Image (cartoon, rainbow, N blue to C red):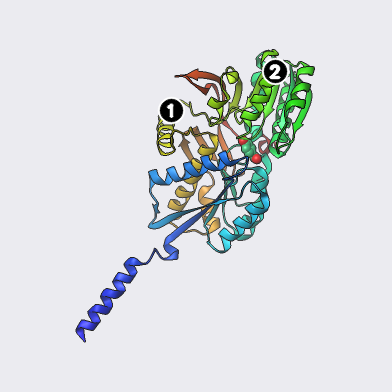
């Protein structure tokens, strides 16, 4: 009798040890990214950064195990929406994260609202994106946030006439509007505004119009991953030798692509919130660890949005003691500040959007490779569209 009793207890203990952590001991994070298609570089960078964050900081928070579930939405909004639904209903994720493009973030927003699940935007950068759900929090940037400082720089640096050339969708239109408003206020003149289709863009006819208009500068926004195609056609059209200066948001001289774009990019002035060349001990350690873990791949601003997004989620879970109620997590995220590899950042508690430094940079060669070298800083910039409301 006694023997049987012990055996049963031992069996129960063995079973318990062999079972995976019970559901309530695991906190799942659903990471929805374009892992294939034209924005695959965004997915690759964010996934690598999120995994690096967990590798460096461990997968246990407040006694719970963190599980990252990565899903490929192929950059298609219908797929994003279906995946968000599945992750909430079947996988019971505590947080939805990722969102490589504005339409993809918008597609998931109703699900985040209904389920009261925080939606951490690591990439999409249209100003209004955060207003699509009260559960959205952003760790990327907004186009107006990085564009206004470029309009200011241009007006102060002998640029009097500009043609704008942007991808024809929400963030491009945001960038164009922010540039034109600010530059015009500063006394400059926007002589033409061009919108290029987002899908399979052929820049040639638009670049011809830039050449014909002969402005002092052309201001460009294309999303991460499209800069190399743009630059190739810029050179093919002879724009690099036209005397028309190229100014852009940092999306165009994206760190993952920059070295492949080559010397034609030298001297390009851009504004953005992150450069792999950012001079801080935190960033040097981040770049080294990211490259070591990813066969030398250079982290770009997408990677940093993902890395900081993971920090936000993990720190919020620490604050709640591992509790995953959506409102509690959201409240823990609001107002959080930390030293990112990009510099100091804060989640504005009122708008749930990121407040961060914007840097003016110039493409230069360092140790044989091209980098966006920062030479001026505008501190603690809020999204100007929401700040004006
Ligand atoms: C966006 O779709 O919001 C987006 C994507 C990539 C960028 C910037 C904005 O580089």
Q: Which residue is mark 2?
A: 239
State whether residue 239 is above or below residue 253.
above
Question: Residue 280, which numbered label?
Answer: 1
State whether residue 365 is above or below residue 386.
above
Query: Could you say whether the residue bearing mark 2 is in a helix, strand or loop?
Result: helix
Label 1 neighbourhood size at 10 Å, few (<14), some (14-19), many (20+)?
A: few
Q: Residue at x 24, y 78 (%)?
A: 7
Asked whether residue 210 is in view, the answer is: yes
Q: Position of residue 33 (x, y in %)?
A: 57, 47
Q: Position of residue 319 (x, y in %)?
A: 44, 51
State whether residue 220 is above or below residue 136.
above
Residues 282 and 244: in front is 244
Residues 217 and 40: in front is 40
Q: Residue at x 23, y 79 (%)?
A: 6
Q: Position of residue 92 (x, y in %)?
A: 53, 62
Q: Position of residue 292 (x, y in %)?
A: 40, 35
Asked if ligand 1 lies within 8 A of label 2, the reply is no
Query: Could you say whether the residue bearing mark 1 is in a helix, strand or loop?
Result: loop
Q: Residue at x 72, y 15 (%)?
A: 216
Q: Residue at x 40, y 29 (%)?
A: 281
Label 2, label 1: how far apart the Cα atoms are:
35 Å
Asked whether residue 383 is in view, the answer is: no
Quadrant occupied by the N terminus: bottom left
Ligand 1 is in which quadrant of the figure? top right
Q: Disc 2 or 1, which lies upstream in sequence?
A: 2
Give the farthest residue toward the front: 236
The reply to whether dot 2 and dot 1 touch (C-beta < 8 Å) is no
Which quadrant of the view contains residue 17? bottom left
Residues 261 and 51: in front is 261
């Amino acid at each position: 009798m006694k023997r049987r009793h012990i055996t049963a207890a031992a069996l129960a203990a063995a079973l318990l040890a062999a079972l995976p952590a019970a559901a309530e001991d695991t906190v799942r994070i659903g990471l929805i990214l374009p892992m294939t298609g034209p924005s695959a570089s965004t997915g690759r960078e964010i996934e690598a950064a999120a995994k690096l964050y967990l590798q460096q900081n461990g997968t246990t928070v407040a006694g719970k195990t963190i599980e990252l579930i990565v899903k490929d939405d192929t950059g298609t909004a219908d797929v994003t929406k279906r995946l968000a639904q599945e992750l909430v209903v079947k996988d019971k994720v505590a947080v939805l994260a990722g969102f490589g493009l504005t339409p993809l973030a918008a597609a998931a927003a109703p699900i985040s609202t209904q389920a009261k699940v925080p939606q951490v935007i690591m990439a999409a950068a249209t100003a209004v994106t955060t207003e699509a759900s009260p559960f959205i929090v952003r760790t990327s940037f907004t186009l107006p946030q990085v564009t206004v400082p470029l309009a200011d720089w241009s007006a102060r640096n002998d640029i009097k006439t500009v043609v704008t050339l942007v991808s024809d969708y929400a963030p491009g239109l945001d960038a164009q509007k922010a540039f034109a408003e600010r530059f015009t206020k500063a006394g400059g003149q926007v002589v033409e505004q061009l919108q290029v289709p987002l899908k399979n863009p052929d820049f040639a006819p638009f670049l011809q119009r830039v050449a014909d208009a002969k402005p002092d500068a052309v201001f460009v926004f294309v999303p991460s991953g499209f800069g190399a195609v743009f630059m190739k056609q810029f050179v093919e059209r002879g724009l690099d030798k036209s005397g028309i200066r190229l100014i852009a948001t940092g999306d165009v001289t994206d760190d993952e692509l920059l070295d492949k774009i080559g010397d034609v990019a030298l001297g390009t002035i851009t504004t953005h919130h992150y450069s792999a060349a950012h001079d801080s001990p935190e960033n040097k350690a981040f770049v080294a660890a990211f490259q070591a873990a990813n066969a030398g791949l250079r982290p770009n601003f997408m990677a940093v949005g993902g890395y900081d997004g993971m920090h936000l989620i993990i720190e919020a879970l620490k604050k709640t003691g591992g509790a995953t109620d959506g409102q509690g997590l959201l409240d823990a995220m609001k107002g959080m500040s930390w030293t990112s590899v990009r510099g100091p950042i804060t989640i504005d508690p009122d708008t749930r959007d990121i407040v961060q430094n914007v840097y003016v940079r110039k493409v230069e060669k360092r140790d044989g490779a091209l980098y966006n070298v920062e030479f001026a800083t505008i501190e603690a910039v809020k999204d100007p569209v929401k700040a004006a409301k």
